Amino acid sequence: MTQFLQALVNGVSLASIYALIALGFVIIYKSMQVLNFAQPALLLLGGYWVLYFATVWGWAFPLAIVVGALFAAATGVIVERTTLRPMVGKPVFAVAILTIGLNTVISVIALDLMGVEIRQMGDPWGFGFVEFGGLNIAHRQIAAIVAVAVLVGLLLAFFKYSRLGLAMRATAFDQEVALTQGVSVSTVFALSWAIAAVLAMFGGVFLGSGVGFERSAAVTALKALPVVVVGGLDSIAGAIVGALLVAVSETLAATYQPEYAPFLGKGFSQLVPYVVMLLVLLFKPYGLFGTKEIERV
Amino acid sequence: MKNRRLVFSSLLIVLALVAAACGDDDAETTTTTAATTTTVAGTTAATTTLPPEPEVAFDLGVTPSPCADAVNEGNGCIYLGVISDLTDGPFAPLGVPLTQAQEDFWAEVNAAGGIDGWDVVITAENTIDAHYDPTQTAEGAVTLADRVLGLAQSLGTPQTLGALPTLVEGDIVAAPATWFSGWAFTDVDAGLIMESGAPYCFEAMNGMEGLYDLRGGTPFTWALVAFPGDYGGDYGAGAKIAAAQLGLGDPVAEILQIPVSFGGSVAETVPALLAAQPDVIVMVTGPTEMAQVAGGLFQNGMTSFQILGAGPTWNVALKGNADLMPLLEAVYVGTSPWAGWDTDTEGHAAMRAAAENHGRTPSGSYVAGWTWQYPWLALLTEAIASGDLTRSNVAAIAATLEDIDYQGILPTRTYAGTPNDHVVRSTFLNQADADTSDGLNPLTDAFVGTIAADFDLAAPCFVG
């Protein structure tokens, strides 16, 4: 039982990281109807900014986070202005392909900056843990869960109460109507990329805390894709539920599959997010919380 | 006028034919008179002016003209290639300093006058990043086959095995960046691979026996976490041989760890180790996987274990993790085929001086890269002295090369005789220690345990 509960705790912690990355997918999709495949690269670059300020310049970690977030947001805006803006009005498919190219370009830059060594994030959590009911919960895991709760709360408050947040919701609902109401759609686009980049940065920070930040973080970030497909591409709640479903399934598989289903092979847990995605798509093609698209034929 | 034109044209054609017949064909053996100095790498290098050398025959990977940006304008140039993991494979953190050490080694040799009138270079063009991929390593060998005399480095056992057909076809000698026990067998490596230090399986035997002694001769449970293939298999085989003889039995968990850079994850490894609770975890992975496994265990409250790590499992960068390093200092014991950065030998001193000259930072990988070049130095010295730098002659000499002087980093060795005659069996045990240059503090001098000493190397420890 303890092993099961420990796997659950580890799954919830992993879900918080997946959720941070997935929320970036959702926010861009809601505003632009574009699936942003560059999110893993934004995670690498965002994580790099934080570790650079925290460990190379030796800044206090909270300050490194704040400045790193500003750099990440600026990266998002620059990317949107220089590469996405000229694509307005172009087929969504073409824009999605463009983001794959962006992912490659930004990854190359980020990986070149990072080098080949494991880089320390400079985080304060270390390898400490608390014992609770026979479970060991790492400080890093607690920090990730709290951070995602706070960030989601802030995002929801931003969308509900701020002028820009309302503009983003209006744009997500109907771009043309939003335009007629005086909403600056271009500002909304840029803002959505900035928010997505900052969320990816936080994902990178938690992936890299503890042991360190390195190239494989981008591979982990890719699992946010099945998360958003499971939850629904345009649903913030779906991103969180999808993250929980995918991450908990993955950690349970990692814990039990080698013992109870070894015939499935080594590394099966890495496939679980995609298996969950396939299963959900079979019954809910728009994801658990996604909006059904109705097209006239 | 017409006749004069005809005569002139005929003369030109004849001249052209003669020139073509005498032209430099890469595939043909050529001879040259080399310049006249001989050198030894290192701080104690001596430069001696000798009488003019006899003509030296050569073919691929050697030019009588000086190397680009040569320090010795009168010397010929020998080109060596490198196939390594330089950007995104599991050993990229090791491959970069390893390659730098080899470039620096030859830069120092050249700066001291070269080898009997020849400089040796590893150019960027002849350095291939194969990403620890056997296919790309094999392709890299094909690419380099017409450009270099041999390989200063071929990183990875399955990678080097994949490149072997090309090496055999071209008589290309290689120094491996791997300690596979099969390199001791000419039916495996065709006598072309010039290994240094004890093979993985001897390293593991000594590691298990040394750790057993360090723990006061008390039996312990153990788990094996190893990369698939010859690296994990060879070291794992040695660990199992030692465990059987020490009465430790089979591993309580045996986990095949896919490299993280290949999409693997420690997500299954950590729960399996938590469930098995071994006293000792034998790790035969890269540093990333080791750090992630150790970190995962610490975060889940498991602290009363020891790690026995193979040489490539450690990387000096781990020293920079202020949170992880104190924990590793308590649990990590690593094996290595030679002593670390701070050791006081002539070779280590030469290496440290070279690193300082070239602005390199201390690392165990730099020590390894440097050490692996001594067989090449001995081989080239002998081949030049024999007056024949052709690939076939260099390969023939390599197969039974003797008196390889490592300047004290390793005992002088030979490749002549049976595997049992020439295999190196000694190992160092090291403890993680943030206060040393490369993060490892030697726990022992070079030692050969009784298990390794008595082991009959009749076949490679691992056959994939």
Image (cartoon, coloured by chain):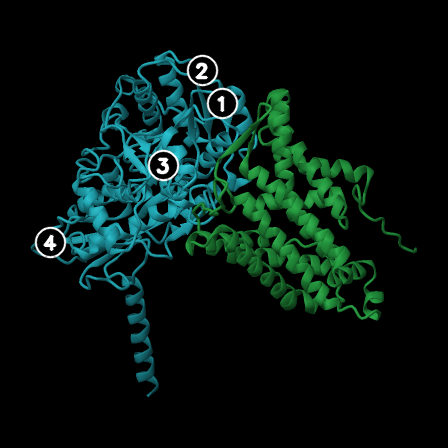
Chain colours: A green, B cyan
Instruction: Choose the circle earlier in sequence order: 3 or 1.
Output: 3
Which residue position is annotated with label 4? B47
The residues tagged by marks 4 and 1 sit, at their Cα atoms, a distance apart of 54 Å
Do the CB atoms of the residues marked 2 and 3 lie less than 8 Å apart?
no
Chain of the residue that carries numbered disc 4 in the rendered image: B
Q: Nearer the viewer, residue B399 or B70?
A: B70
The residues tagged by marks 3 and 1 sit, at their Cα atoms, a distance apart of 22 Å
The residues tagged by marks 3 and 4 sit, at their Cα atoms, a distance apart of 32 Å
Q: Are marks 2 and 3 on the same chain?
A: yes
The circle drawn on residue B254 is: 1
Do the CB atoms of the residues marked 1 and 2 lie less than 8 Å apart?
yes
Instruction: Choose the circle earlier in sequence order: 2 or 4.
Output: 4
The circle drawn on residue B250 is: 2
Instruction: Choose the circle earlier in sequence order: 4 or 1.
Output: 4
Hey, what amino acid is under mark 3? Thr
Which residue position is annotated with label 3? B178
Q: Position of residue B119 (x, y in %)?
A: 22, 55
